[in-house]
Image: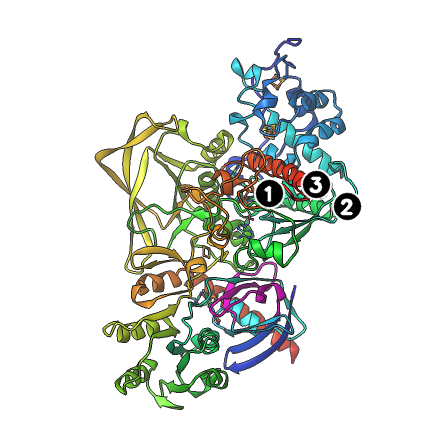
Amino acid sequence: MAKKITQKTKTPMPCRDAEERSHSFEEVSLGYTLEDARREAERCIECKNQPCIAGCPVEIDIPAFVKAVADGDLTRAFVVLSEKNLLPAICGRVCPQEEQCEKVCTIGRKFEPVAIGRLERFVADWAAAQGLEAEGVRVAPTDKKVAIIGSGPAGLTAAADLARRGHQVTVFEALHEPGGVLIYGIPEFRLPKSIVAREVHALERLGVEIKTNHVIGRTFTIDELFTELGYEAVFVATGAGLPYFPNIPGVNLVGVYSANEYLTRSNLMKAYRFPESDTPMIRAANVAVIGGGNTAMDAVRSAKRLGAEHAYLIYRRSRDEMPARKEEVEHAEEEGIEFLLLASPTEILGNERGRVTTIRCQRMALGEPDASGRRSPKPIPGDTFDLAVEVVVFAVGQGANPLISSTTPDLHVNKWGNIIADPETGATEKKGVFAGGDIVSGGATVISAMGAGRRAARAIDSYLAQGMTDGA
Amino acid sequence: MYPVLSNEQLAPDVHRLWIEAPHVIRKRRPGQFAILRISADGERIPLTIADVDHARGALAVIVQGVGKTTRQLNRMAPGTAVLDVAGPLGRPTDIHPGSRTCCIGGGIGAAVVYPIATGVKAQGGYVVTILGARSRDLVILEDDLSRVSDHLVVTTDDGSYGRHGLVTDALKALLDEGAVFDEVVAVGPLPMMRAVCEVTRPIGLRTVVSLNPVMVDGTGMCGGCRVQIGGEQKFVCVDGPEFDGHQVDFDELASRLRAYREQEQEAAARYDEECASADMWAV
Ligand SMILES: Cc1cc2nc3c(=O)[nH]c(=O)nc-3n(C[C@H](O)[C@H](O)[C@H](O)COP(=O)(O)OP(=O)(O)OC[C@H]3O[C@@H](n4cnc5c(N)ncnc54)[C@H](O)[C@@H]3O)c2cc1C
Ligand SMILES: Cc1cc2nc3c(=O)[nH]c(=O)nc-3n(C[C@H](O)[C@H](O)[C@H](O)COP(=O)(O)OP(=O)(O)OC[C@H]3O[C@@H](n4cnc5c(N)ncnc54)[C@H](O)[C@@H]3O)c2cc1C
Ligand code: SF4
Ligand code: SF4
Ligand code: FES
């Protein structure tokens, strides 16, 4: 260990004022200045084992890029980053770093870890401002056609990698705008849509064709992509788009939303700008969001921004068990989100017009750890409370959308509807069909979906090279 | 962009537009719909694909101007274009070859029933159609429907055309006369579909209805279109839009359709004002 630690905590991230931002969809975190970044990068002690690299699902050479930042050589930093990560501006913002690269950082054992995510974001934003683009080797074009279904992080990554290998790539997207959850789910205040659009444009410059408004399974089936449209390989990256509603009375009252619908209306359809935009949503003074993940956090913070006086987050375990990124939980709290922990809804009550008036909750206590290792919540008998709300948003997980599997009989799914694919290659049991991202893993992370896209691209490339002799 | 090829008025506030969208019609079957978005700030709205023209790569939608987006659409001139058309969406109609089917279309429901009747006829079925409207000027698609029907009855609520009365009166009369059907397909306002189901339920006559909840994505991702069918939750955009009418919870659907009533009225009023001032300048 060459260096001594001079600063025990992370260099703070400049943020918009909490009160101001709770009414605005502008991005909350403003990003490091060069000075901040170099100061933070200096904290890396360039330890021998470099555990951070293995902590990153795409194995970015973190010490090398951090060192380049410390040296003030941002071009080099960007080159190192882009070797492994196609979307650093996005990952720097949304990766759950405390569970990944930063979790295992050596100095994190005693102090706060190096703020790897913030540095990654800084470098990526700097590169974008300079108009720098990831180089990537481009080889001579082949005549192989590959179809990618879904334009979330898994699909975008696979498309870029395959285009760089010279293949003719088409991305089919069901919605009118590409980006997947990055566009319809994660709000502007956390991930500006201009960043996603920039990455999509970069892809188009690589020669990738993006066909929006194409719902595979309906517009064409997977078999038709092969037989009628002449694709030689297909990558299914359709995400985890099937909302769950709990089986309690009142879930179909007016005012009850899935987080997908609530966030899609707000983000993709820009309902927060109604009536300038045409898509409405119910603006309520009191909103309850159920769940403890990133999706719940995004929904409840959006509710506040849409004008709620009281935006409640109802979660059945305690704060420590919340799966959301730590930073988002802190931001939510600063913005005045009211956390109702150890509580779970049992019923939603409505008025004579079928509109939500009240959510009834059961208080919980934590019991023994369950299979996931987290302490499982147990109801406290007789301990319930009512909360007056007009909107309830469920962010209690997602299933696999069956549109593709139900129209592709020889594509096999597990009991949760997730497509069965080889974790190393994404190969499915159907010849020429690969799958990855949330449709395989269930709801996971942006970076893991990208990792799956990258692995599948590699496998598809060799599958195409082998003259498609070797099927699954 | 998807060009509007033609726009023809069928009744007050009801237009038929042909729109070029080759990818949507290639695989389209009767009963399916498309989702359209006119412009960048526009709403996504579901519309039944009423007809297709493979030579032109175009689909027909028949639109009733009930709110901002549908009124905007009805004003679109040939040569303009809509920004997005996605589809075909929903499950195709479950057509039993050779079936004796009574197709009932009330109001704009005729636009949804027309492709279904066409499909049943093409599969060798026997089609009796009951076409209902409030008054004579609101009767649409009479010629088109009579071409694909073995027998067509028109009813108007006020008696200004055809048989005086509701579609259910005509259905009861047919049944009383001894007509035998394998199934009934009823599409129209919720109270109409419910009333038809009440006629057919006691005699155990299978009745299919096409539901029209508010939708967003149309792919099963948002759950906004959920309905209760026989106590089970279904998503109309992927599991429907057609369901066994005897299993539908119409009360719940009716209340969910009113979810955005106030905002819709606000948007429509603003749009009408804009149109009024635009028209003023045009004079
Ligand atoms: C609200 C929210 C917040 C999140 N926050 C974070 C976070 O902070 N950090 C993090 O790491 N992860 C976060 N996640 C999880 C992360 O976004 C996902 O794990 C990731 O986006 C999955 O990527 P994907 O490419 O597999 O699918 P998706 O991003 O879901 O994209 C799938 C795409 O496929 C399209 N599609 C689906 N079916 C079809 C079809 N039949 N035909 C054509 N196209 C189709 C969809 O429209 C969509 O565009 C969040 C998720 C949500 C919902
Ligand atoms: C599968 C399906 C197929 C459809 N096919 C057709 C069709 O072929 N022709 C046609 O004219 N309409 C059809 N509709 C209805 C059409 O989608 C709505 O009329 C449209 O979304 C209204 O949009 P708007 O912005 O003009 O009005 P809004 O401002 O959204 O609403 C105005 C009024 O219409 C009511 N409304 C809103 N959404 C719907 C809806 N989905 N169904 C019925 N009423 C609604 C509102 O309660 C309000 O009173 C279909 C709907 C579905 C779900
Ligand atoms: S991609 Fe994510 S996990 Fe990897 S270094 Fe960046 S922030 Fe950490
Ligand atoms: S683990 Fe932490 S200290 Fe070690 S190299 Fe990685 S970032 Fe630097
Ligand atoms: S419209 Fe979103 S699930 Fe049906």
Q: Amino acid at mark 2?
A: Pro
**To which chain does the residue with label 2 belong?**
A
Q: How many marks?
A: 3
Q: Amino acid at mark 1?
A: Gly
Disc on res. A141:
2
Judging by the rendered image, the residue that carries numbered circle 3 is A465
Q: Is residue A226 above or below residue A318?
A: below
Judging by the rendered image, the residue that carries numbered circle 1 is A471
Look at the image and say whether residue B26 sits in the magenta stretch: yes
Other residues around mark 1 within 10 Å, as few (<14) / some (14–19) / many (≥20): few
Q: Nearer the viewer, residue A226 or A443?
A: A226
**Residue B93 visible somewhere in the drawing:** yes
Residue at 51%, 54% in the rendered image: A271
Mark 3 against mark 2, which lies toward the viewer?
A: 3
Q: Which residues are magenta?
A: B20-49
- Residue B118 appears at what percent x and percent y? 48, 77
